[in-house]
Image: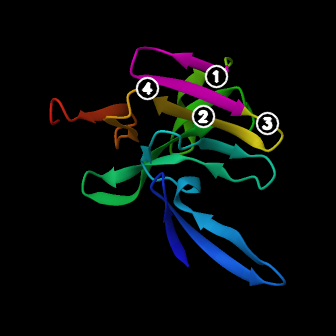
Amino acid sequence: MLKLITQSCFMYRCKIHTLLSIGVVLWQSFDHPTDTLLPVMKVGLNKKTGHNGLLTSWKDEDDPRGGDFSFGVDPQRQREVFIWRDSHPYIRYDIMIESWTNNDILSFSVDRSDEGIYVSFSVFDKSIATRWTLSRTGALELLFWTAINMK
């Protein structure tokens, strides 16, 4: 069964029938991002499975195949996130602090636990549609739309 949950995350659930019906998530879109990071979506490393959820740029403006750039937590240096170009470090960001706010619109947070390390952002004003995109040139771009400006 495919299900769209509240935060625009697609999930594939498998029902295991025993005395109780238990839903097991086999796949969800937020664990496999493409070039876009939405509010509350996490990019990072699952220490238990070894899965590193990365943003990956598009090949070209009209071609969604994986491009040359990726963004995420470095498995070897878990206090840093990188933009890689063809698996080579391109830009490095320190993530030593747990959360920070750079303006009145959004805040960033780092979630460290035994299960993994993840980077995410949230928006204070829910009427502003916001997303980060990793461009085909390797830039992290903040895009937002407000109902007031209609852009």
Give the Cα distance between marks 2 and 3: 12 Å
The residue carrying mark 2 is 119
Q: Which mark is residue 48?
A: none
Magenta span contains residue 129: no
Q: Mark 3 points at which residue?
A: 113
Question: Residues under labels 3 and 1: Cα distance?
Answer: 14 Å
Element under label 3? loop
Report the residue at 53% width, 44% height from top: 41
Going from the N terminus, do you reach mark 1 or mark 2 first? 1
Asked which quadrant contains residue 8, the reply is bottom left
Whether label 2 touches label 3, CB < 8 Å: no
* Viewer can see residue 74: no
Q: Which residue is drawn at 56% across and 47% down?
A: 54
Which type of secondary structure does the marked residue at label 1 adopt?
loop
**Quarter of the image that includes the C terminus:** top left
First to last magenta residue range = 98-111
Answer few, some or many: residues within 10 Å of disc 1's Cα (few below 14, many 20 plus, some between 14 and 19): some
Residue at image coords 53%, 40%: 40
From the image, state whether disc 1 or disc 4 is nearer to you: 4
Mark earlier in primary sequence (3, 4): 3
| Total marks in image | 4
Measure the alpha-carbon separation of dots 3 and 4.
Answer: 25 Å
Three-letter residue code for mark 1: Ile
Residue 124 got which mark? 4
